[in-house]
Image (cartoon, rainbow, N blue to C red):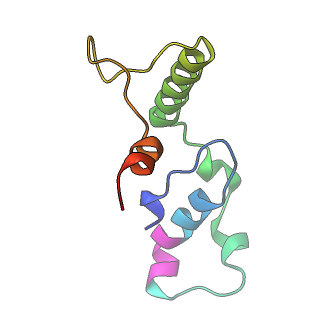
Amino acid sequence: AIDEYQINGVQTTLSFCRFVMEHDAFRSGRFDTHFVKQHFRPEYLLQPTHEGAQVAAMMGALLHGRSAKAPVSAGAGAGPVASAWKRNRTQPR
């Protein structure tokens, strides 16, 4: 479930939780209240991802397009795409 979370823009403890859940000592049940002191180092979490950079680039392009009042389209010649919020608002219940 931790791998399915996608939270951007704020720091979370998900990477630490992933470290704990994947550690052999934790998974085997051979740990105590000193688990963090014995097994964890902050540098273990410093793994840059290309996915985060891609998301940031896409969001920047999207926000730039909106600030220039340019319609966002699904592809060349497809025209503006209504957001899911707008589509849901206009559909009868």
* Residue found at the far front of this picture: 92
Q: Nearer the viewer, residue 10 or 76?
A: 76
The residue that appears at 51% across and 13% down in the rendered structure is 70
| Residue found at x 48% / y 25% | 58
What x and y, as percent, mark residue 6?
50, 51
Our reading of the magenta stretch's main secondary structure is helix
Q: Nearer the viewer, residue 9 or 71?
A: 71
Q: Is residue 15 above or below residue 61?
A: below
Q: Which quadrant would residue 19 be assigned to in this image?
A: bottom right
Corner quadrant of residue 17:
bottom right
Please say if 36 is above or below 5: below
Horizontally, residue 82 falls left or right of residue 78, namely right
- Is 23 magenta? The answer is yes
- In the image, residue 11 lies at what x, y percent? 69, 50
Q: Quadrant of the C terminus?
A: bottom left
The residue segment tinted magenta is 21-27
Asked if residue 78 lies left or right of residue 56, the reply is left
